[in-house]
Amino acid sequence: MRTRQPTTTLEDQPIPVRAKLAAAWTSFMFLYAYVDILNFFTPGVIEDILDGRVFEFDLSQTFSTTALTLVAIPILMVVLSMTLPARATRITNLIVASLYVPVTAFNAVGESWLYFYGLGIVLELILLALIVRYAWTWPRTAPSATSPDRETVRAQQQA
């Protein structure tokens, strides 16, 4: 007869805010890129590209540079979320995610495949909302009783 082992609970370790932000920006980038890639399978898109047009825009160096910038910013946010000081990371994430909400919503304008684009945009907006939430609710630490405050340190340095 087999003895039954006691059931154990998996340890649920807290995830640092920086890791949550980087993961959310990474997920955002995958969606952002794959919506564009899968769009190539929409009838007429390849023909329009070969004719030099994307949506209502002429293919040009300006268009390509703008598109690269729109993709590069979220890519850089992965690195910046992990490397900037906490305060700068928080502020940068709040600003950039907030600016990407209208950019993301704009992608639905004039599209005929509303289910496809609608799903992509809703998922991207959910990720942007998570980024804003993670940055907004960034945990704060109370000053330690053993560590001096800034004014005390400055006074000691000036003395």
Image (spheres, rainbow, N blue to C red):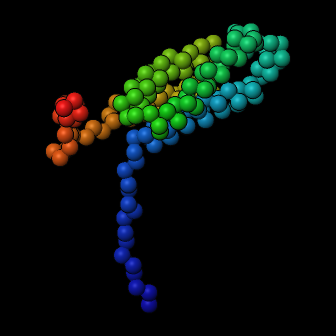
User: From the viewer's perspective, is residue 134 above or below residue 99?
Assistant: below
From the viewer's side, name the closer residue of 156 and 96.
Answer: 156
Expressed as whole percent of the image width and height from the top left, the position of residue 74 reads 55, 28
Q: Left or right: where does residue 113 sit relative to residue 3?
A: right
* Whether residue 112 is visible: no
Which residue is at 68% across, 17% downward? 65
Is residue 79 something that shows in the picture?
yes
Q: Position of residue 21 (x, y in %)?
A: 45, 37
Return the residue found at the far left. Answer: 145
Residue 48 lies, in percent from the top left, at 79, 15
The residue sitting at 44% across, 33% down in the picture is 84
The extreme front residue here reads 159
**Quadrant where the C terminus is found in the figure:** top left
Q: Is residue 89 left or right of residue 116?
A: left
Asked where in the image residue 139 lies, by quadrant, the reply is: top left
Count of numbered marks: 0
Q: Nearer the viewer, residue 78 or 143?
A: 143
At a point 44% along the width and 28% down the height, the residue shown is 93
Q: Position of residue 146 (x, y in %)?
A: 17, 47
Q: Residue 6's quadrant in the figure?
A: bottom left
The image quarter containing residue 154 is: top left
Q: Nearer the viewer, residue 142 or 71?
A: 142
Residue furthest to the bottom: 1
Please identify the quadrant where the N terminus is shown: bottom left
Q: Residue at x 46, y 25 (%)?
A: 97
